[in-house]
Image: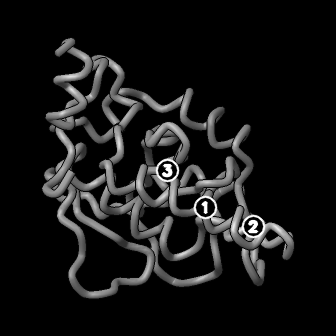
């Protein structure tokens, strides 16, 4: 077996130096295959059965937990999904449709944001933003209602300006249990 094949079997990122890439477990590949079959089975309806919403949010939290050493909140806490090894409270946001993070109005605020973009076809998550959440929230309109997004272009620009010392460090390149 090739080194890349063995790494995949063991759930290890192929390029350990690429901290922005996280391989997803085989269960996600199975889900993508089932999704494609579902879309095909109902092709006459033109329904897309998008993989989004709560599913993508939960998958984002699970995906970010091990690589960043996050301790996920067991009890729902507004605006906070986890705590980092250094004690920072963290919000994890994710998208499977190529758009930036979505926000709804609320009181909860985290110190840090990890934003993932899923490439379901390749079973990979990309860390698009890893930095203070306040920098991202500053680009939301004041007093908004409903759901607002920070554009993917803007989130990438903001991430490019983050100092290394402000980022959460990867503590693991191995996928979690059940990978």
The image position of residue 79, as x and y in percent, is 44, 75
Q: CA distance from mark 3 to mark 1?
A: 29 Å
Q: Secondary structure at mark 2?
A: loop
Judging by the rendered image, the residue that carries numbered circle 1 is: 37
Q: Quadrant of residue 8?
A: top left
Residue 119 drawn above or below residue 110: above
Task: Report the residue that reaches farthest toward the front.
Answer: 41
For disc 3, the neighbor class at 10 Å (few under 14, some 14 to 19, many from 20) is many
Q: CA distance from mark 2 to mark 3?
A: 24 Å
Residue 66 drawn above or below residue 158: below
Q: Is residue 24 left or right of residue 53?
A: left
Is the N terminus in the top left, top right, bottom left or bottom right quadrant? top left
The image position of residue 160, as x and y in percent, is 56, 27
Q: Is residue 108 left or right of residue 158?
A: left
Q: Is residue 66 left or right of residue 96?
A: left
Q: Quadrant of residue 9?
A: top left
The image position of residue 74, as x and y in percent, is 21, 82
For disc 1, the neighbor class at 10 Å (few under 14, some 14 to 19, many from 20) is few
The image position of residue 45, as x and y in percent, is 85, 76
For the residues bearing labels 1 and 2, Cβ distance under 8 angstroms: no
Q: Secondary structure at mark 1?
A: helix
Q: Of callouts 2 and 3, which one flags the residue occurring earlier in the amino acid sequence?
A: 2
Q: Which mark is residue 115?
A: 3
Q: Secondary structure at mark 3?
A: strand
Q: CA distance from mark 1 to mark 2?
A: 11 Å
Which mark is in front, 3 or 1? Answer: 1
**Nearer to us in this view, 85 or 4:** 4
Q: Of callouts 1 and 2, which one flags the residue occurring earlier in the amino acid sequence?
A: 1
Judging by the rendered image, the residue that carries numbered circle 2 is: 48
């Amino acid at each position: 077996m090739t080194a890349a094949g063995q790494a995949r079997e063991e759930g290890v990122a192929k390029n350990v130096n690429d901290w922005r890439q996280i391989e997803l477990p085989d269960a996600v590949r199975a889900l993508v295959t089932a999704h494609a079959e579902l879309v095909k089975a109902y092709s006459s309806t033109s329904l897309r059965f998008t993989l989004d919403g709560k599913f993508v949010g939960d998958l984002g939290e699970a995906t970010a937990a091990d690589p960043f050493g996050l301790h996920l909140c067991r009890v729902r806490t507004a605006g906070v999904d986890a705590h980092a090894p250094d004690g920072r409270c963290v919000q994890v946001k994710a998208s499977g449709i190529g758009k930036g993070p979505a926000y709804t109005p609320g009181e909860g605020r985290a110190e840090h944001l990890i934003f993932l973009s899923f490439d379901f076809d390749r079973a990979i998550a990309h860390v698009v933003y890893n930095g203070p959440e306040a920098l991202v929230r500053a680009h939301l309109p004041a007093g908004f209602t409903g759901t607002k997004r920070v554009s993917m272009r803007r989130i990438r620009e903001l991430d490019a300006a983050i100092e290394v010392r402000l980022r959460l460090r990867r503590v693991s390149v191995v996928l979690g249990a059940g990978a």
